[in-house]
Image (cartoon, rainbow, N blue to C red):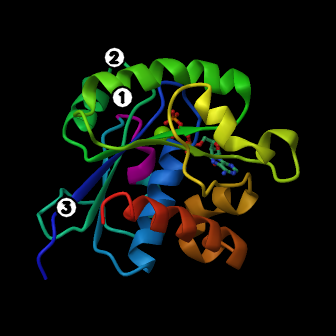
């Protein structure tokens, strides 16, 4: 089968937004959906590397042309060369943020960095993480995204303890609902590059 590799940079200049959690779990979801996936850890903190060493769920590899998708985890610093280079070589950027307005305001600088380094015409989206269902903020995520000028994925990721357990136990820590959430987001992301 002939296909081109799609590279996706996970980013936010702010620490703790959930970049690594979503990089690993979305990569695993893509794999569960039948794609060959590589995860690239460009953060010197090495959290994604450690996670994969613990769980063995997915491959931590340099892309070799046989991967359908490559997810790149980046450090929480906008001036990081690793982040800027990742964006420059990516087909897509995912800004990971909670829906809290204060977090979104600090994400505004990340939007500017994406616009500066991601080649023109390539899609960038917010993926809302740590969303608490039945809260006012969860009701209109699209409108929140508009305020910082980046469209949001329709799929969003809830705040769930299972996602923390997954760092030790991998995909098997996740219940059906958590898996469904990740697979919906993965399908939407894959559809950005049909
Ligand atoms: N959806 C979620 N539900 C519950 N906990 C979460 C979720 N996403 C992330 N976390 C937790 O939040 C913390 C930070 O997550 P993570 O390490 O993925 O963020 P990060 O953006 O990669 O951080 P850094 O900027 O330091 O690299 C971790 O303890 C993680 O388990
Ligand atoms: Mg991280």
Residue 48 within the magenta-colored segment of the rendering:
yes
Q: Quadrant of residue 52?
A: bottom left
Q: Find residue 167 and report its horizontal and vertical position in percent.
A: 56, 59
Mark 2, residue position:
79
Q: Residue under circle 1?
A: 114
Residue 39 vertical placement versus 113 (above, below): below
* Of the image marks 2 and 3, the number of the one nearer the N terminus: 3
Is disc 2 in contact with disc 3, using a CB cutoff of under 8 Å?
no
Question: Quadrant location of the C terminus?
Answer: bottom left
Specify whether 77 is left or right of 133: left
Q: What residue appears at the point 80 percent right and 46 percent down from the top-left corner?
A: 139
Foreground pick, 19 / 96: 96
| Range drawn in magenta | 44-49
Residue beneath disc 3:
5
Tell which circle, 1 or 2, labels the residue nearer the N-terminal end: 2
Mark 2 vs mark 3: in front: 3
């Amino acid at each position: 089968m002939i296909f081109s590799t799609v590279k996706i940079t996970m980013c936010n200049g702010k620490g703790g937004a959930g970049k690594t959690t979503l990089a690993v779990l979305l990569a695993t979801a893509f794999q569960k959906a039948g794609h060959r996936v590589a995860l690239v850890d460009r953060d010197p903190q090495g959290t994604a590397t450690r996670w994969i060493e613990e769980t063995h769920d997915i491959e931590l590899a340099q892309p070799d042309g046989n991967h359908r998708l490559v997810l790149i985890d980046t450090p929480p610093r906008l001036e990081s060369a690793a982040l800027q280079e990742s964006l420059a070589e990516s087909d897509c950027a995912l800004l990971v943020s909670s829906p809290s307005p204060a977090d979104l305001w600090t994400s505004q600088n990340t939007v500017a960095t994406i616009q500066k380094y991601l080649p023109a015409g390539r899609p960038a989206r917010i993926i809302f993480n740590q969303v608490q269902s039945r809260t006012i903020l969860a009701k209109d995520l699209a409108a929140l995204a508009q305020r910082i000028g980046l469209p949001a994925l329709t799929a969003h990721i809830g705040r769930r303890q299972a996602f923390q357990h997954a760092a030790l136990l991998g995909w098997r820590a996740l219940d059906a609902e958590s898996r469904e959430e990740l697979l919906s987001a993965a399908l939407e992301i894959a559809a950005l590059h049909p």
